Every structure is written in structure tokens, then in C-alpha cells.
Amino acid sequence: MYFSNNNIAIIGLGYVGLPLAVAFGSKYNTIGFDINSNRVSELANGIDRTLESNSDKIKAAEQLKFSSNINDLKHCDIYIVTVPTPINQFKAPNLAPLLKASEMIGKVMKKGAIVIYESTVYPGCTEEDCVPILEKYSGLKFNEDFYCGYSPERINPGDKVNTLTTIKKVTSGSTPEVATFVDNLYASIITAGTYKAPSIKVAEASKAIENAQRDVNISFVNELALIFDRIGIDTNDVLDAAGTKWNFLKYKPGLVGGHCIGVDPYYLAHKAESLGYHPQVILSGRRVNDNMGMFIAGKVVKMMIQKGTNIKGAKALLLGVTFKENCPDIRNSKVVDIYNELIQFGLEVDVFDPHADSSQVKKEYNIELQQSPSKYDAIILTVAHKEFLEMNINDYKKGTHTIVFDSKAALDRDSVDARL
């Protein structure tokens, strides 16, 4: 099957959309579209703040053009949607970006168009929520005048080894013929190969359970950390011992944030509850993981009190605010939970992160990043950036009473007072 006559539009140029646009733009006529005109302008000049691509890769995609003008989408045949699917303050799916993107595509697509969704959703969302929007605004009939596909994104932000083309891609389509077309389209850029799911709902569900499974496994070791803290033994010591058995899964305790693992289980739970089933394991795991920030803050404060530190007005330093190491992504950062809890205890809290964009942190969390850390009564390693692993923690201690808490078990054990 040949795609050279098709014009492809990638809707959304974030961590998922940009690598996809670069890959397709290296082979086919591709429009990388985003409603953020500043983002589009930067990418046109080879600047990518997500660090998922670089100037050389962008320029090498000779058939890729960037735009924030909806009129540039009118000549496209294939639309691939990679907009975010967050949750709201009530932990319910927020489909607004997805539905707005569908509305926009519906206004410009023509007969024969194929709309492929990559955004993580619950099973049924593409056909039950997005397709009616496409039909309404296009005046076209689903599976007669236009078609849909779903291929869940598997981008791992900050990972330079497991990249878009080296991760096997699940694909699907709204008819057998379209499923084959979509599968062949992705197979033309994915060197790791593709897997054609039997239906769109199966493909949607496969993505949801990928992240739910990791979330549940991490919640188990996080709960172990809560138990072993009370027993008075080090969780990582226990995991090292248990890990000597060949079939033990070596998950580590920690904060579970980001755009996937900390969000997607709520999509699956939402769908289950709409069908009358209240998921037990998934939601209990979410509760454990969502409370780890408060546990870390409380643990540090207790240790400070034991050392005779006056909590009111004491200074604390959080090393890191991104949701993972060596990456600028701050989406759904659980470090913020530690920050807010310490503030409520009456501490003065600085946050230092050389990878995060200070303006984005201020806009998203109303936190002013510290550029020059001073001396502190408590230091918490929250993200294992390479810069933090190379620094001398002692340079930032106010005195021998300073508590150092390593939430990543990444620092020299002799240099910390406790670790998660």
C-alpha cells in the first residue's frame, strides 16, 4: 500500500505529536499543527522545548511543515490526533482537548478522510465520543464517508533509547480495510514493527491497562514502604533481597506522576463505573500512590522535630519538580504534593530544578523556582536528575541537624538520613 499521495496532519505537537510529525515528515507530506502559535514558531526554527527532538532532526524532515492555521488542514487526507487527555480536580476524564480537536477536524475534513487517535482514552471513547463530533461538524457519515483508527502512543519522555520508531506500535481501524491501511501506514515508519488489534476498543483498552498495571505494581511497593517504615527497616534492602528470586518484579517505591501512569487508570475506572462496576484494585492503588507526597513530607517533618528543629519558619529544599529524571516534563508532578504539605506545616520551601522551565512551573503550579540554593534545615531529593547525583549535598546543609531524605534511593546511603 502506498501513502505518497496522502497528506498527513498531526494535531498537537507535544511530547507525542512532534516525534510523530518528524517521522512522517521524513517520508510524506505532513502538517504539524498546534493551536499554540508560539510553539509552532519555535519548531519552525528548530527549537523544541520538550527535548524530544532537535534542530537537525526537524530540518531533516524535509516534507514537514508547521502551522497553527486551520485552513492548512483542509487539503489533508489523514488526521492523527495527539492532544492531551488529562483528568480534572475530581479525578474524572477531561475530554475537552480531544473533543475540540475532533470538532476542528470535522469542520475541515473531506470525504474519504481517515482520523486516527493516539491520545489515551477509555475503551469506546473514539467511537462513542469522538465519532459523533466528527459526524456533526463534517456532515459526513462514519464508515461510509470517513473512517477512524486508534493507535495508542507509547512515547517515554526523556528516553533516548526507547524512542517512537523502536517501540512496537499497536494499531486498529474502524473497518478491516482501514485497519490494514492504518497498520501499514505506521509500519512504514516504525522499525520495531506493529501489532494490528482486532478492534478500536481493544487497542484503546490495551493502552489503558499498560499504565494501570504499572500503577498497581508501584502502589504495592509504595504500600510496602509505608509498612516497612513502621517496622523500621529499609524498603530497598527488602527489595534487593527479594529480587534475588528470578521471577520477582523489581519495582521501586516513589512518586507516581506524569501524563500517563498517574492519570490513565482513572480513565479505565471511569468507564468501569459507567457500566456499574466499581474497580477495587485499580482505585486502591491510585489512593496509595496519590498519598505518597504527603507521607514523604510528614516523614521529613517528624525527623526534623526529633532533631530539635523548630518547624515554623524552617527552610526546606526540594531537588526536582519534573515528574521524572533528566526530562523537562512537569505534567502532573507529584513533587507539588510534597511542596504544598510542607508549606502547610509552616516551612519555607525552595524548589530547584535545572531541567524545568521556570515560567511553566510558575504558570502551572504557582511556584517560583530557586536559581541559587542556599542552606537548609531539610533537603529532599525528589527527582534523580544527573546534576543532583553529582552535587555535594553537604554544601546545602544548614548544620548537623539538617535532614536529608532520598525519595529515589539514588544518593550515597551514608549521606542521607532516610530514603523511600
Image (cartoon, rainbow, N blue to C red):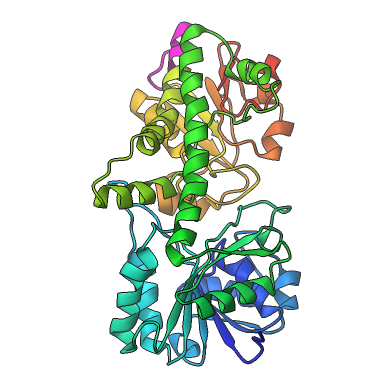
List x then y, in percent, for residue 365. Answer: 41, 47
**In the drawing, does residue 66 fall left or right of residue 368?**
right
List x then y, in percent, for residue 41. Answer: 57, 76
Q: Residue at x 44, y 85 (%)?
A: 70
For the residue pair 28 and 203, the one nearer the viewer reads as: 203
For the residue pair 268 and 359, the one nearer the viewer reads as: 268
In which quadrant of the rendered view does residue 290 lie? top left
Vertical comparison of 381 with 62: above or below = above
Q: Residue at x 58, y 57 (%)?
A: 154
Q: Is residue 103 magenta?
A: no
For the residue pair 335 and 239, the one nearer the viewer reads as: 239
Query: Is residue 241 visible to us here?
Result: yes
Q: Is residue 307 magenta?
A: yes
**In the drawing, does residue 329 fall left or right of residue 246?**
left
List x then y, in percent, for residue 337. Answer: 41, 35
Q: Residue at x 60, y 72 (%)?
A: 183
Vertical comparison of 402 with 73: above or below = above
**In the drawing, does residue 200 fall left or right of residue 394?**
left
Query: Is residue 257 visible to us here?
Result: no
Q: Residue at x 46, y 59 (%)?
A: 202
Where are the magenta residues, as a range? 301-313
